[in-house]
Image (tube, rainbow, N blue to C red):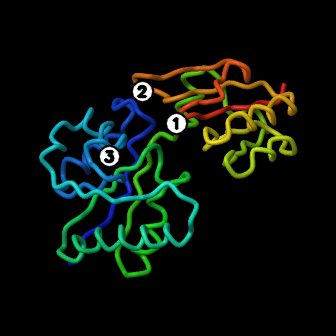
Amino acid sequence: MKGIAYGVGVGPGDPELMTLKAVRLIRENDVIAVPGKIAEESVAYKIAAGAVPEISGKELVVIDMPMTRDREALAKAHKKGAEQIEDYLRQGRNVVFLTLGDPTVYCTFSYLQHILEADGFTVELVSGIPSFCAAAARLGVSLTEWDEMLHIVPASHDAEAVETLSGPCVLMKSASRMKEVKDVLRRSGRSVCAAENCTMENEKLYRSVDDIPDEAGYFSLIIAKER
């Protein structure tokens, strides 16, 4: 029998926010895959280790997922990563792939999932607390009320969408062009708050667009609501 590939969300950063199911799957399976080049340096691994210390004794598989927009390079990396996982699945061994937040929201595992399923393997996704829900909780704000529609915007690609959308917006992937994103937010007239490294030790919370540094870190997320 072939093994099962699990895409497991470990939440936004605080190990206490991991689900019981995520913890159980890590404990029950011996092969743990993590994105990056050195397993122990992966943020997802560090989060999981905070809740499941025995993970250090598992067989760790690093899946290199380069930060690039070169589609050819990405396709090659995804194919190689899927092949690494498939080697274990053919042996009848399950593989638990750790991913930040939730595996259904802008998750690199999605690309591996498509390949694995096309190759005839079973994939199961295990939800984790999404970063924008955790950020809203830490900031003490609601994401939606009454009949509002929530928009998740990939700010590195289309932050300008905030100016035309109606309803609250969550801007993810904004760090690479934060200065331009802030300019868009000022023009929009929205109420803005943000979280950097949400629920992690070096967490920073911002209550206005002007408080957000132009050089905010990679794990930065903005909530923009209509006044």
Q: How dense is the environment of label 3, judged by Cα within 10 Å: few (below 14), some, or many (20 and up)?
A: many
The residue that disc 2 covers is 200
Q: Is residue 183 above or below residue 159?
A: above
Q: Which mark is residue 219?
A: 1
Name the quarter where the C terminus is drawn: top right
Q: How dense is the environment of label 1, judged by Cα within 10 Å: few (below 14), some, or many (20 and up)?
A: some
What amino acid type is highlighted by mark number 3? Ala
Q: CA distance from mark 1 to mark 2?
A: 10 Å
Picture quadrant where residue 171 is located = top right
Q: Is residue 92 above or below residue 127?
A: below
Q: Which callout, 1 or 2, points at the residue further toward the start of the chain?
A: 2
Give the structural element (helix, strand or loop) at label 2: loop
Q: Position of residue 172 (x, y in %)?
A: 62, 42
Decide which of 116, 219 is in the foreground and name it: 219
Name the quarter where the N terminus is drawn: bottom left
Picture quadrant where residue 77 is located = bottom left
For discs 1 and 3, the disc positioned in front in the rendered view: 1
Q: CA distance from mark 1 to mark 3?
A: 22 Å
Q: Position of residue 184 (x, y in %)?
A: 81, 36
Res 152 visible: no
The residue that disc 3 covers is 22
Q: Please tell me which residue is depicted at 68% across the width and 18% down the height of the picture.
A: 211
For discs 2 and 3, the disc positioned in front in the rendered view: 2
Q: Is residue 93 left or right of residue 213?
A: left
Q: Please tell me which residue is depicted at 24% across the width and 74% down the height of the picture.
A: 87
